[in-house]
Amino acid sequence: MKNFRLILVLATIVMTAVSCGPKKTQKIKEKIPYKMLVVYYSQTSNTKAVATEIATRLNADLEEIVPLEPYENDFQATVERGKKELEEGVRPKIQPLKVNVADYDIIFVGYPIWFGTYAMPMWTFLDQVSLSGKKVVPFCTFGSGGLESSVRDLAKAQPEANILSGYGVRAARMDAMPQEIDQFLKAGGFIDGQYTQLGDFTEQQAVSEEETAIFEAAVGDYPMIHAKAETAGMRAIPGGKEYLFIASDLPREDRPDMPLGRMKVYVTVLNGKAPVFTRVVR
Ligand SMILES: Cc1cc2nc3c(=O)[nH]c(=O)nc-3n(C[C@H](O)[C@H](O)[C@H](O)COP(=O)(O)O)c2cc1C
């Protein structure tokens, strides 16, 4: 019995050592010479920056989706046009693609989040092509979040595609993007090298005063989040900590009709730096 316990303890130590900390990837490319394409739409260049970073790191082909009638260089005008198109199921016409997606094995598909899903020109692209049997890697940029909901729509639009884990970054955190893309591409096996495998969050517990202050510092001045943190879990990340808060919307005087719900808010606190939220999942 004593020996059995000892074996169990040793096995747990070994498994923990294997599941956390630095990992080395096996590069997909070396196994089979995959052909890779990065295709993206970007209105204000955030997604373009991510697309360019990925294509450069992978030496992949890069293709931009260009609407025939460009969106105005004005946020409110884009919101009005985009909302109307989304509600009416309009697909804005796009320029013919210079590449044939059928020629590629792995296709990185990038877009800004509009109204919780991919931007309208991406709807047109996804109507025009077949990603059936392709490995598809979604990536996006957003104000607060939307990778998960856009990937659900992507899976509906291309049910035969093999959609792999995606990457999303807040427009306000573009400076963190190159390093995150490095880790993302290594973790996915697209490039060689060491990456850090993060552990699990601790179990959700009622927030402490300190955690409430961290949550408020992270989301305080972001106009789209008006919420109260209820519970939190935490994990170590290189150079600091990451929190996963479960928060509830608070009623808003300026938007009395807005449905109230709950959300997950991811917050990073790097040593010596102010807390920042990295994404909201509704
Ligand atoms: C019409 C429109 C709708 C948007 N909707 C959302 C949204 O629902 N959620 C969000 O987090 N950000 C939203 N944003 C912010 C964009 O996703 C963000 O600014 C993105 O980085 C823009 O990417 P781009 O520079 O590649 O165009 C919206 C922006 C626009 C113009």
Image (cartoon, rainbow, N blue to C red):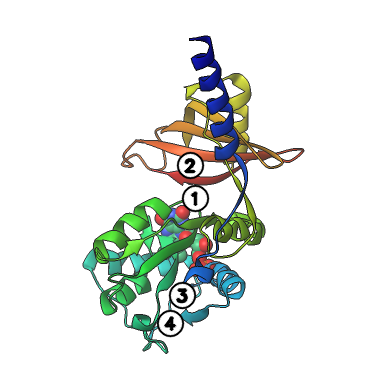
- In 3D space, how far apart are the residues under numbered discs 2 and 1 (Cα atoms)? 9 Å
Which residue carries the number 2 mark? Answer: 225
- Please, is residue 101 above or below residue 135 in the view? below
Q: Earlier in the sequence, mark 2 or mark 3?
A: 3
Where residue 137 sits in the image (x, y, percent)?
Answer: 43, 64
- Please, is residue 189 above or below residue 263 in the view? below
In the image, the residue with mark 2 has its CB under 8 Å from the nearest atom of ligand 1:
no
Which residue carries the number 4 mark? Answer: 66
- Type of residue at label 3? Tyr
Where residue 69 sits in the image (x, y, percent)?
Answer: 38, 84
Which of 46/32 is in front?
32
Q: Earlier in the sequence, mark 4 or mark 3?
A: 3
Within 10 Å of the Cα at label 1, are there few (<14), some (14-19), or many (20+) other Cα atoms?
A: many
Which mark identifies residue 280?
none
Q: Are marks 2 and 1 in contact (CB under 8 Å)?
A: yes
How many tags in the picture?
A: 4
Q: Residue furthest right?
A: 272
Secondary structure beneath dot 4 equals loop
- In 3D space, how far apart are the residues under numbered discs 2 and 4 (Cα atoms)? 32 Å
Q: Earlier in the sequence, mark 4 or mark 1?
A: 4
